[in-house]
Image: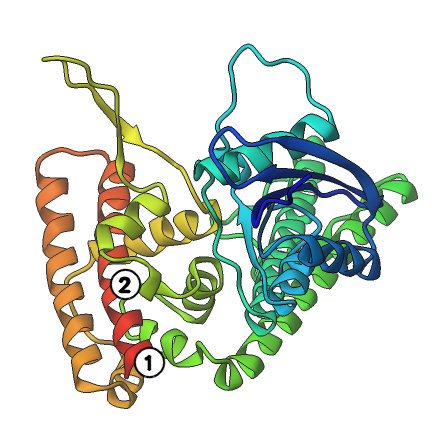
Amino acid sequence: MEQCSEVFVGIDVAKMRNAIAVADGERGGEVRYLGEIDAAPESMRRLVKRLAAKHARLHFCYEAGPTGYGLYRLITDLGHSCMVVAPSLIPRKPGDRVKTNRRDALALAKLLRAGELTAVWVPDEGHEAMRDLVRARAAAVESQRVHRQQVSAFMLKHGRVYPRKKGWTMRYLRWLQEQRFEHPAHQIALQEMVEAVRIAKERVARIEAAIAEFVPSWSLGPAVQALQTLRGVDLIVAVTFVTEVGDVTRFESPRQLMGYLGLVPGERSTGDTVRRGGITKAGNGRVRHMLVESAWTYRHPPRIGAEKLYRLEAAPPRVREIAWKAQSRLTARYRALSGRGKKATVVCTAIARELVGFMWSVAREAQTA
């Protein structure tokens, strides 16, 4: 049988074995299942070479997931195109209730041939390492929050209420150490929980120090430095934005980036009926959460603090101009929306959406400089 010169290969990746399906290039061509092979790099390399010996052009795809981008790099290093597919954007039939590795691989091959798949942006190894470090910091912060909540719940259960408003200061820690319980088991439980908070706090500090150490030597380090000229954007916000969003030049406009981060209003319209709701909350939740938190700083009048002054002095003139324009516009926008009686959460979400546009401009200036 004559071999097709162009084929589309769908791979359903897993921890131990990958399911492989191949679709011939012509419209309505044969789609066949090749079976499952070992997921080790050497096995996948042999498979790619075997297919390359039979066909002139190969196109591969697999779903993004916990297996990472190692398979993508292996295939592209061998000179073939590969797409890492966004799982949430794969077309699925509502009535299809059967899911197997074979069916998933066949569906990926068909959809890749039809051009119906959406690719995710694949970072290089250095970028992926920085992103893993930033996500490790986020996990450490969440762990610290959980341990603090456990201490607060323990004290509330025993009727011990801190007399001041602000917690987790040195004065609050001294107050915890002064607490005495009749049963020694309670005293031990409190000390263990306080110690867990201390360990989690030290872990966060260590990771943040490592982030600050690696940013200057990172290829996107200039973008991180430039973003810190904006009000409400410190090192952690800037590096989280850059690691999660990646190369901002892949977005043609700020509006496209706003939609990518889920900060644009949802809409369900038909005919003459137009219904717009809250933001879509699609895309990366880590970045969206930090941007909304940063938006709270724009409730104050525009001014440049001592720390930002040093950042602005080290930035290019164009970046300084964008940073001041952002502060002037967003503070006025905050006042205007608040004056119209909008809820604070709605106002901050609107400010965060516009802040994304200025971050897009600043990052582009830093990357193209």
Q: Residue at x 67, y 34 (%)?
A: 105
Distance of mark 1 from mark 2, alpha carbons? Answer: 22 Å
Mark 1 surroundings: few (<14), some (14-19) or many (≥20) residues within 10 A? few
Mark sitting earlier along the chain (1/2)? 1
Q: Is 331 positioned to the left or the right of 118 in the image?
A: left
Q: Are marks 1 and 2 in contact (CB under 8 Å)?
A: no
Q: From the viewer's perspective, is the residue at label 1 or at label 2 nearer?
A: 2
* Secondary structure of residue under mark 1: helix
Report helix, strand or loop for mark 2: helix
Residue 271: x and y in percent read: 13, 13
x%, y% of residue 221?
44, 79
Q: Residues within 10 Å of mark 2 (few under 14, many from 20)?
A: many
What mark, if any, has residue 360 been given in the picture? 2
Image quadrant holding the N terminus, namely top right
Name above or below for residue 221 compared with residue 143: below
Q: Which mark is residue 307?
A: 1
Most distant residue in the right direction: 184
Name which residue lies at 71% across and 62% down: 198
